Structure formats: structure tokens, C-alpha cells
Image: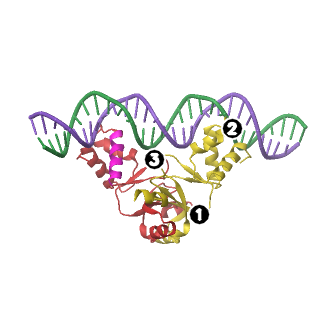
Chain colours: A red, B yellow, C purple, D green
Amino acid sequence: MNYSKQRESVLQTLRENVVHPTAEYIYDIMSKSDSSVSLATLYRNLNQLTESGRIKKIDGLENSAHYDHNTDEHYHFICKECKKIFDIPADVAADIVKNTEEKTGFVIQSHDVIFHGLCNDCKKICK
Amino acid sequence: MNYSKQRESVLQTLRENVVHPTAEYIYDIMSKSDSSVSLATLYRNLNQLTESGRIKKIDGLENSAHYDHNTDEHYHFICKECKKIFDIPADVAADIVKNTEEKTGFVIQSHDVIFHGLCNDCKKICK
DNA sequence: TATTATATGAGAATTATTGTCAAGTTTTCC
DNA sequence: GGAAAACTTGACAATAATTCTCATATAATA
């Protein structure tokens, strides 16, 4: 993987945005500083960065994928009401990998956990 | 929700196929007995059955959604090699909901866990 | 610097899924 | 049992997210 201005810009945009943005969102931000960036390039870079482990892709939310610059093991919570995505520390399921490997014999390379529900702000409003 | 022949047929196809099929797969099966079923009808029924809780939609795998007639709480493992999807009992992460609710204060309505790795057959071959 | 490998922009192409609408089924209830 | 209301269907157009293509540009290598 060679150096590229666009790829650095993708990484920087991800780091600067605490939210877990979609490709579309990153594209909008990047377009402001360089109006000629191509959506294809953005997707290419997101895929390369994901494959090389420098960022994480979050699937299973709505239609489009979200991306996360935090590559430490952690999970995600999406609020049904405000649609915000929150990080959840991995220790809520301490032995999940060990237990599953013991029970099944499978080799686990990665796992993702996604919670759906109401965040603290929305649970007050939505009872 | 009224009775409908097609919807029953979707449910039956899901029950008879131990795998966790995609809409496309279900469509192929259904087309064999009734060549006039419409893909739109199939998607409509899959959505209604999912919303009413009679089946489960599995997101976060490849491009397309998979569907599961097993609505008991359980997780999924997808083998990177053979792409088969296996059920994982929910007790591998016994207190995950309680722990997460306590730690965050959020209200958790549902959660999904997806493991990626190698199943027993493939781990021998792929070392 | 010349050569090779990699990255880019533009836009077409693909894939999964949803929307539209007129016609067909089910349910309701008199 | 039959008319009216509510729901479902098939056909196919439309959409949305993502990937592909390809000629050009940029970076790494020697």
C-alpha cells in the first residue's frame, strides 16, 4: 500500500469525527476541502484500510456500512430513536470467545456485537 | 395480517431449510413449486414476518440479508472458508445484556452477535 | 531518471431491496 | 351469501449502496 493523500484524508476524517460515519458522511466532509474526491476512491480506501486492520467496518446497521477508527475490541449500541451509535466496552461479555471456542471447537477470528435499544436521552422521552 | 398462501410458503421454506437462506435462495426454492411468485412479494413477506417476530433477519453477513426461522435467542457463526452459518447458543455470553444495561443505563431491546472464523471441517484444511 | 506499481476521478454497471399500481384474495358484517 | 373494506399479489420500474472500468496521475524502486 503506497502513501496517498486521499487515504490519509479518510483516516483523518474518521479520527476527527467521534460519530461512526457512513461513507456518504465522510464523502461530504472530504468534499468540502477537496471538491474533486471521488466516491469510488473513498470506498476503495475504506476497504483497504479495513482489510489492513487500520479501521473497522460496522455492518448490520440500517442500509449502509459505518466506519470506526477505534480498532480496540469493543461493541456497538445503536439507539432506535436517535440512531446514534455508542461504543460499548468488550468486557460486558468477558469470556464470549473462549466459551464459544470450547463449546464448538471452531476457530474464532473476530466477532461483532450490536445492541439495539434506547439510549439515556431517548429512554426518558420514549418511556 | 391476513392469511396468504405465499406467506405460509415462505415460512415453510424457511423451516425446511436448515441453512439460513437469503431472499434469493428462498425465491429459487419457491419458484420451483410456483413459478409466478414475485420477488417483491417475497421481500414484503420476509419484512412482515420479521416485524411480527415470527422469523429473524440476520444482517452483517456479506451483501445480502439471511433469514432464520429459529426465533429463540441465539447467535451466529459464519465460516470464512465455506461460508456456512452455524447457530451458537446464547449462553456463551450469559450476562451480556444485564452487564451492558448496568454499565450504560441504556435500555436494550435486542442484540446480535456474529462470529467469523473457521468451522471444524475447514480448520483442518486451512490449518 | 526510467520503469514499474499503485492510486485516482469520472461515470457506467451491478446488486439488493423497495415502491407503484392495477388486479386478485381474504375478511367483515349485514 | 354477497357487497364492501382491507389486505395481498405480480410485474416491473425505481432507488441506494457499492463496485467496476479505464485512461490518467502519482508514488516507489532501481
Q: Nearer the viewer, mark 1 or mark 2?
A: 2
Instruction: Give the residue pinned by disc 3.
Output: A64
Q: Confirm or deny contact between disc 1 and disc 2 (CB under 8 A).
A: no
The furthest residue to the front: B125
The Cα–Cα distance between marks 1 and 3, rounded to whole angstroms, is 25 Å
Q: Regarding mark 3 in the picture, which secondary structure is present there?
A: loop
Magenta region, residue range: A40-52
| In this view, A4 is above or below C21 | below
Can residue A29 be seen here? The reply is: yes
Mark 3 touching mark 2, by CB under 8 A?
no
Find the distance from the CA under tag 1 to the CA under tag 2.
33 Å
| Residue that badge 1 annotates | B73
Vertical placement of residue A97 versus C30, above or below: below
Q: Which residue is mark 2?
A: B34
Q: Say yes or no: labels 1 and 3 on the same chain.
A: no
Tell me the amino acid under the disc marked 3. Answer: Ser
Which residue type carries mark 1?
A: Glu
Which of these two is toward me, B61 or A33? B61
Residue lying at 27% horizontally and 44% vertically, measured from the top left: A6
x and y percentages locating residue C2 in the rendered image: 12, 33
Residue found 49% across the figure and 67% down from its top: A100
